[in-house]
Amino acid sequence: MNLDVEDLSDRIDILKGDITVLEVDMIVNAANESLLGGGGVDGAIHRVAGPGLLAECRALGGCPTGEVRLTAGHNLPARYIVHAVGPIYQDGRQGEPDLLRSCYEGALRLAEQHGVHAIAFPCISTGAYGYPKEEASRIAVETVVHWLSEHKAPRQVIFCCYEAVDAKLYVKRLDAIFHPED
Ligand code: AR6
């Protein structure tokens, strides 16, 4: 992995707020295996995207944990939604880290394939699915940094944190990578 710290820090942003309002090409949803909606960020995305999203999701027939599926953004400003099914956290020894990593990688791969400039991620699995926030932020940041160091696309990755505690964790993690001497 070849780390060009200046380029990488340009390509990663942390935002605190609601992912449904972001005017980016692609947003990621923290979905469940049914892909038929739910609470949290999934509920918010379906509310704003509208019934067309539910109809498109229904036709996909679900998605196993650790995988991703692509839909249009419907009434969202975003053109695409990647529905990522994160793991339900048990004790960390049931493959949760690999499954969470594969959600981030799968979304980044779709972004690259679709020529996406900017993609925004919520903190997958850290709400209803109970993944410890600190550990999940480590996996999210490491996976994204690794991808960006080896791929030109997507150009921009946004960590969209709904909760201040998450935004702080991401700032801390990225600082540790970009300013290790501090
Ligand atoms: N924008 C960005 N992030 C949000 C928003 C929003 N509008 N709303 C909540 N979050 P969760 P999970 C954050 O529970 O843990 C659903 O019912 C939230 O603060 O949405 O992967 C699905 O249908 C947290 O940091 O997703 C599944 O059944 C993060 O999104 C299940 O929950 C993830 O919390 C998935 O659980």
Image (cartoon, rainbow, N blue to C red):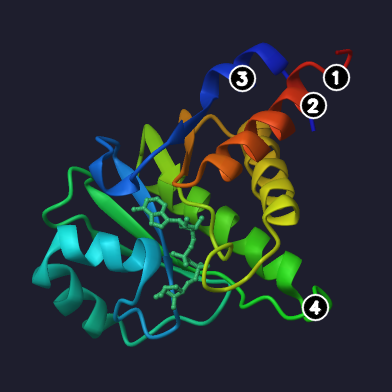
- Which part of the image, by quadrant, shows the N terminus? top right
The answer to the question of whether label 3 and label 2 lie on touching residues, with beta carbons closer than 8 A, is no
The answer to the question of whether label 4 and label 3 lie on touching residues, with beta carbons closer than 8 A, is no
Helix, strand or loop status at disc 1: loop
Q: Quadrant of residue 92?
A: bottom right
Q: Residues within 10 Å of mark 1 (few under 14, many from 20)?
A: few
Would you say 105 lies left or right of 176 here? left
Helix, strand or loop status at disc 4: loop
- Check disc 2 and report the residue beneath it: 176
Q: Amino acid at mark 2?
A: Ala
Q: Nearer the viewer, residue 132 or 57?
A: 132
Mark number displayed over residue 91? 4
Sequence-earlier tag: 4 or 3: 3
- Check disc 3 and report the residue beneath it: 9
Numbered disc in front, either 3 or 2: 2
Task: Please tell me whether residue 44 is drawn above or below residue 171 in the rendered image.
Answer: below
Q: Nearer the viewer, residue 55 or 15?
A: 15
